[in-house]
Amino acid sequence: MIRIAARPCDYALEPGRAALVVIDMQRDFIEPGGFGASLGNDVTRLQPAIAPIAALLAAWRARGWPVLHTRECHRPDLSDCPPAKRERGRPPLRIGDPGPMGRVLIAGEPGADIIAALAPVAGEWVVDKPGKGMFWATCPPAGLQARLQGAGITQLLFTGVTTEVCVQTSMREANDRGYDCLVVEDATESYFPEYKQATLAMITAQGGIVGWSAPSAAVLAAIAAAAPAG
């Protein structure tokens, strides 16, 4: 057991049973010209999360621990994209429209790819999700819950974007399914800094009603002290 200094109290990480989850670090959200920018957002606000996620990935990979990446994307025919999602607001580019990185948020298009700095390696899970949360309509035929249970995973450490939307939704879904969840504070970002801080407060309120939070430095230090690589 590895104890991580966290809020609202220490988090007890079980080596091999804790998966690192990297939510939606895709070009469409991180880079200029993608879906995030089309909504009027300053995409540079997400970039500070990249280095902490890379450091966490290195630590997990060195120890052979499980890693899970998600991508929010849809089928080319948009059969898994509700009209209410596609038609909301007035963005210059809607889901499925052609853009600088191919069709926006469509599986297989360049914009749906995870950024090169955090690209998955062989053996890591890549879960395509049509919604905000990572459990809904993913990993057919049995679903993500069954796959995680089959791998013996009981803990999930969350990183990625955006804090208040896909990260929080996935973490709440996981909490309802019985996972012990921790969000890594500097390894997640939002286009709206105040939303990020509010989300972290909500997650850890009332004794950790949704889960724990900790900075990446605390996670990495605890792992290095208790479980040297190799």
Image (spheres, rainbow, N blue to C red):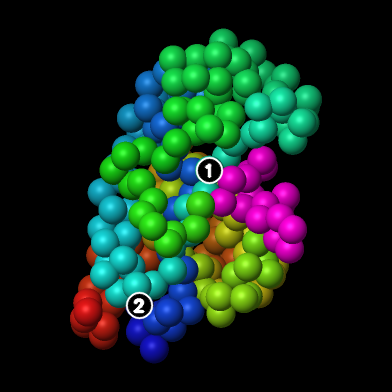
Q: Which residue is mark 2?
A: 4
Q: Give the percent coordinates (x, y) of residue 137.
A: 72, 50
Answer yes or no: is residue 140 visible.
yes
- Looking at the rendering, the stretch of residues picked out in magenta corresponds to 127-143
Q: Give the percent coordinates (x, y) of residue 203.
A: 55, 61
Choose top left, top right, bottom left or bottom right for residue 45.
top left
The residue positioned 45% from the left and 36% from the top of the image is 113
Q: Which quadrant of the rendered structure holds the C terminus?
A: bottom left
The residue positioned 29% from the left and 43% from the top of the image is 117
Choose top left, top right, bottom left or bottom right for residue 165.
top right
- Foreground residue, 102 or 180? 102
Task: From this view, report whether residue 115 is shown above or below residue 211.
Answer: above
The residue positioned 74% from the left and 58% from the top of the image is 141
Choose top left, top right, bottom left or bottom right for residue 55.
bottom left
- Position of 104 with respect to 192 (left or right) is right
Q: Give the percent coordinates (x, y) of residue 162.
A: 49, 42
Q: Amino acid at mark 2?
A: Ile
Q: Would you say residue 55 sits in the magenta stretch? A: no
Mark 2 closeness class: few <14, some 14–19, many ≥20 residues within 10 Å? many
Q: Would you say residue 132 sits in the magenta stretch? A: yes
Q: Which mark is residue 102?
A: none
Q: Which residue is mark 1?
A: 71
Q: Main secondary structure of the magenta part?
A: loop
Q: Give the percent coordinates (x, y) of residue 46.
A: 37, 37
